[in-house]
Image (cartoon, rainbow, N blue to C red):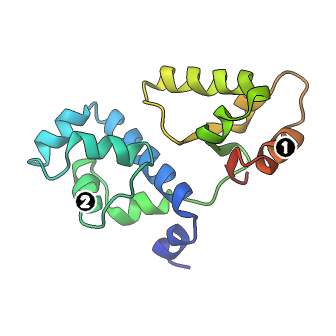
Amino acid sequence: MTLRSRFDDLPPEARNLRLGSLLREHRLRGGLTMADVERRTGGAVKAAALSAYERGMRPVPANRLPVLAELYGSTPDALLARVEPPTPTGVVIDVVALERAPDQAPLLAVVRDLLRKRREPAGRLVGIRSSDLLSEGEDVTVVLDALRERGILVQPS
């Protein structure tokens, strides 16, 4: 299986979140702000667009990925190679569905706190470690199955 087909096999929401997270990781590792990226790409990648890519709210256009990869000292294939199918440690939460579940207020507070700590604006989807979903003594499988049944868990773990 090629790198691109492995990436393409992911659902679009997971693909966008994973690639966006990797782009953010590379940007921060390089000590760059979003404004720095816009400036260094000569405006080819606007800060607002980069924000949407990093949050998984918009797919990264094929003509922008090489520009970002080069800026971050990588290649598109190297970035895509790190976009793998989900592992049991990470899940994708539908924040809108979570907000509609009043009995999930504690989890919503955890997600909002996590976004605040990450300094990320609230979006529809957020990636989170499954361990962050648990209260002491809870079984991760039971919690994830319940969230999946209610449409809160977007990507199976």
Q: Position of residue 44 (x, y in %)?
A: 14, 53
Q: Quadrant of the N terminus?
A: bottom right
Q: Secondary structure at mark 1?
A: helix
- The vertical placement of 20 against 76, above or below, is above
Residue mark closest to the camera, 1 vs 2: 1
Residue receiving disc 2: 64
Q: Residue at x 25, y 31 (%)?
A: 33
Tag 2: Cα neighbours inside 10 Å, few (<14), some, or many (≥20)?
some
Looking at the picture, how far across and down is residue 31, in whole percent?
28, 30
Quote the CA–CA distance across marks 1 and 2: 38 Å
Q: Residue furthest bottom?
A: 1
**Amino acid type at mark 1:** Ala
Disc 1: CA contacts within 10 A as few (<14), some (14-19) or many (>=20): few
Q: Tell me which numbered mark, 1 or 2, is placed earlier along the sequence.
A: 2
Three-letter residue code for mark 2: Arg
What residue is shown at x 51% (from left), y 67% (from top)? 7
Q: Is residue 111 left or right of residue 48?
A: right
Residue where numbered disc 1 is placed: 146
Q: Residue 141 at x, y = what percent? A: 86, 44
